[in-house]
Amino acid sequence: MKFNIFVLSFPIVLGFTLCTVIAILSNPHIFTSFFSNSPAKLFYDIEHYSNLVIHPTCNAFYPLWPWLISKLERPQTVNDAAFYFRIIGSLLSLISIPQFILLLKQNIKSYKIIFLIVILYVVNPLSVFRMIGYTEGIFSVLSLIFLFLISNLKITSKISIKQLLILVSIFILAFLLSLTRPFLIQVIFSSILALSSILLINKFKNSDNLKNYFKTYGITTLIICLGALVGYCAYGYSCLQSRGDFFAPFHDQKSWGKQLGIYPQLFLIPLTSADFTAIYLPAIALILSWLICISISIRKMIFIAPKIWQWILLFAYPPAFLAFYGADFKKANFSDKSNDLQVLNLTQSANKISTSYIFWFCIYFALIHSIIIVFSDQKLTSLRRFIFGTPYFFVAIAYISNCFPTRKVSQLLILLIVVSSIWLVKYWLDYANNVWIG
């Protein structure tokens, strides 16, 4: 059967709709909260974004999203602006679904993995933020275009006209993303680390294309960083003109109680299970990625399937998962007594991650967000939505999932989808009751 992106999108949208309808039937206030333009419905930071539509100014909230609403709908009141944020944000969230499928189709071999990862992206509870008017909606759409452009770059010693046009488009997208939300610091570290990882891995593999990787992805990294820098400078200059402070968006965040520091309790005592998972999952995914690369480049590693109780620990208390699974992994690779462990063989797709710039970019992008928040905010404000509300982490998980047998991975993804769907209903109910969810 021919792969049709829009046909595949339909059951995914239907799944999200079903969860939402169940939540609305449980509490009809969700429906009225979403479509009302009453002042009582300015949940969370929507009030601040809406104020920026009516009275543009420089603060910690970035200008592109409010500017877009002001040009598209021209609302006259803060309440009307909040209503348009939710409606347009929801449309953008729907648009991101076929976008995400298209991106994964270009890079992932298994259609089953593509389907399940996109469902997980759509029905995970933090997807609520893409619907309620936050920047997650527009940020996800722009990010998917950005990643799609990067994945279309060809490894070559010469830059063609087509390559040049793609690089210009990447610069523009980085510029726009930098005007949507805090992006500059994250993207600088992510792009440089992605480039470094590819060069390091392929040096160990003695790849003949090392110079071409350096040239293609080195230029890409430079373009991305320049685009993000110019984007922030444009906003910073407007802040300098209006407030006399080029770094006002950063300084404003300090007024929210954010301060650089070391908070070791966050790694051991969870504030919420969602935040605890958001701290550890990007780091665990990165460790697994490097083990895969070591296995295909330097020394063959033995990967084992976690036991059921270890899967539970992964999402209930990740430090315990690392301890127990780490012991089993060590036993499988450095001991003769490993007959009781179920071995997982890597697929041919595992070779692809060593040269995939968007894979490394996405996994580091999620990790950098986690690091920044963990070392600057004891309350972990917005951590979970930064990790699970945008597509970057899910792109990385799709690549990793494609490295292992599809049947085993599918069983885990289906279980996660079921749990996420239930949790999504709960988040909608919390949203209607004005309970903080992300």
Image (cartoon, helix red, strand yellow):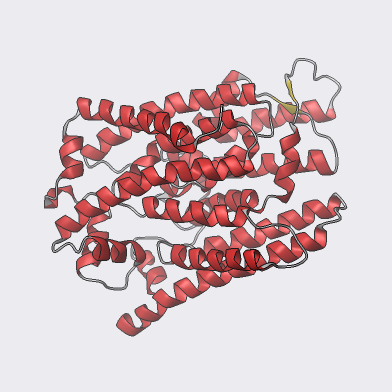
| Near-viewer residue (388 or 14) | 14
Residue at the spot x=33%, y=65% of the render?
255
- The outermost residue toward the left is 38
Q: Position of residue 153 (x, y in %)?
A: 65, 58
Q: Quick check: 324 above or below 286?
A: above
Residue at (63, 48) in percent of width and height: 359
Horizontal side of residue 88 vs 283, given as left or right: left
Which quarter of the figure is the C terminus placed in?
A: top left
| Residue 217 percent location from the top left of the image | 69, 62
Q: Where on the picture, by quarter, is residue 180?
A: bottom left
Residue, x 74% and y 19% (percent of image)? Answer: 341
Q: Looking at the picture, does residue 383 appear above or below residue 66?
A: above
- Give 45 or 173, whichever is nearer the viewer: 173
Along the viewing direction, whichever of 317 and 146 lies nearer the viewer: 146
Q: Which image quadrant for residue 94?
A: top left
Q: How many marks?
A: 0
Q: In this view, does 438 lie to the left or right of 170?
A: left
As drawn, the residue found furthest toward the top would be 340
Q: Position of residue 228 (x, y in %)?
A: 51, 68
Q: Is residue 334 in view from this perspective? A: yes
Q: Can residue 269 be seen in this view?
A: no
Residue 277 position (above or below residue 254): above
Q: Name the quadrant of the N terminus.
A: top right
Residue sitting at x 58%, y 31%: 111
Image position of 40 (left or right of 337): left
* Image x and y of residue 143, in percent: 49, 54
